Amino acid sequence: MEQNNDLTKLASVVEDMLSRFNKLKEEKEDLLLTLAAKEEQIKELQESVSSLNEEKSDVYERVSGILGSIDEWEKSQLAEEKKSPEEKTSETATHADSQLFSMDV
């Protein structure tokens, strides 16, 4: 009789261990699925960051170009202000004549 009780107790312990093992196995599968989803999300976010960095670089280059153009314009304005009034008048007339003939019809 005592052996029967021991076998029953052993069977109960084994069933409990198998039940916990199956639960842990299911939990592992769930965690692996979650991990795969997170890795995909990380990949998408890294691509997005890369794209935004490229866009930022393009915008930086364009802004630098615009600022360079403004600097050149300011320098030309300062140079023009330093010219004598007679030089300005003759240059304006020459510039106007060249524009008159270079207009597209």
Image (cartoon, rainbow, N blue to C red):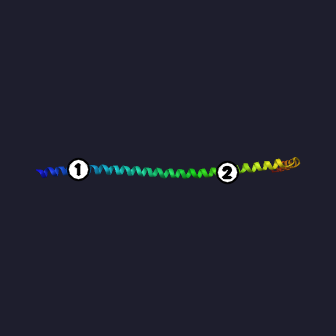
| Residue in the image at 73% along x and 48% along y | 70
x and y percentages locating residue 71 in the rendered image: 73, 50
Asked if one can make out residue 53 in the rendered structure from this viewpoint, the answer is yes
| Residue in the image at 23% along x and 50% along y | 15
x and y percentages locating residue 63 in the rendered image: 66, 49
x and y percentages locating residue 9 in the rendered image: 18, 49
- Within 10 Å of disc 2 (Cα), the crowding (few <14, some 14-19, many 20+) is few
> What amino acid type should be assigned to the residue bearing mark 1?
Glu
Give the residue furthest to the right.
86
| Residue in the image at 26% along x and 49% along y | 19
Q: Secondary structure at mark 2?
A: helix
Left or right relative to 22: residue 45: right
Say whether disc 2 or disc 1 marks the residue closer to the N-terminus. 1
Question: Looking at the rendered structure, which numbered label has been put on residue 25?
Answer: none
Tell me the distance, in whole angstroms, between the alpha carbons under discs 2 and 1: 72 Å
> What amino acid type should be assigned to the residue bearing mark 2?
Ser
- Residue under label 1: 15
Q: Secondary structure at mark 1?
A: helix
Left or right relative to 61: residue 33: left
Left or right relative to 88: residue 50: left
- Residue under label 2: 64
Asked if one can make out residue 105 in the rendered structure from this viewpoint, the answer is no
| Residue in the image at 55% along x and 53% along y | 50
Give the residue furthest to the left.
1
